[in-house]
Image: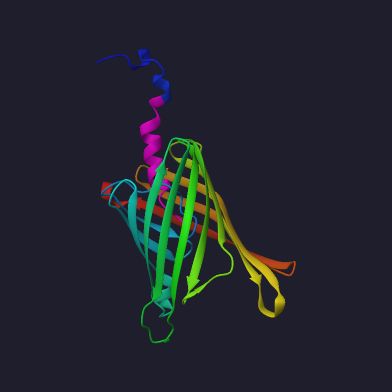
Amino acid sequence: SFDKSNIPDFSIYKNKPGQLEGMKSGDVSRYFYTSPAFTIGKNEISANTQGFSYQNLKYGFTDNFSLELGTSFTGWLLQIPLVAVTPKYRFVDSPKIKLSAYASYLTVLPNPMDNRGNVFLFGVNSTSGNESGNVSIGVSYGVVDGQFLDLPLFQLAGAKYLSTKVALIFDSQIVSFGRFIDDDIGFFYNAMPGIRLMKKEHSFDLAAAVFGVNINGEGEFLVLPYVGYSINLSKI
């Protein structure tokens, strides 16, 4: 045995293993659009929620490439079953910044309501920060039933880790309608400030979800409680 306190700067590293485990479980893509540039590790699989009713399983083929399969239980309850496939690749992994790109394909399966639809989303996300906090910024375009949307969707998310068990989190999106119905101009936004509770390979989010819409300078908003989870199944 040896005295670790004699190792220069050991105090910087002695708490990192637990911190990094909490980050790995917490930084898996949590919400539907704001997917941090972090990727799940090679041969790891996780389950987590995104938004209010969207759940997914994610598998890491490499440390930089993962594939996500998702669905919405709300869609199944409404007899409009939704499935989504999202490959994601991190093409820059430096100490200062990480960049990832993803493409999502969403489709509604045949259903008794006779509702069908296909959506493609293409996005790029950057994440900067370190083991104690990080910020993610992203932008994505959508193609709905073969038509490109006029304007992109912007995303901003962040996390500040207070300890290996608690983090402050924030997630938001805003999309402009551009020129709307009857020459109206408007935009939709949502924001989720909250806390993340972590325990090794599990994490839970408790947040206040604010949804709003603004058309021609007049708007309304709605606040709802939100609970999300992320579980690293490969470590259980």
Q: Give 234 or 153, whichever is nearer the viewer.
A: 153
Q: Position of residue 132 (x, y in %)?
A: 48, 35
Q: Residue at x 56, y 61 (%)?
A: 153
Does residue 204 show up magenta in the picture? no
Q: Is the residue 72 above or below the residue 65 in the image? A: below
**Picture coordinates of residue 230, whole percent (x, y):** 39, 52
Q: Relative to residue 71, is residue 169 drawn left or right?
A: right
Q: Residue 9 lies in what quarter of the image?
A: top left
In the image, 1: left or right of 18? left
Magenta span includes 31: yes
Residue at figure coordinates x 45%, y 60% from the top left: 50
Pinpoint residue 181: horizontal percent, then vertical percent.
66, 78
Asked whether 121 or 84 is in front, the reply is 121
The location of residue 66, given as percent across then percent down, is 33, 54
Which range is magenta? 13-32
Residue 170 appears in view:
no
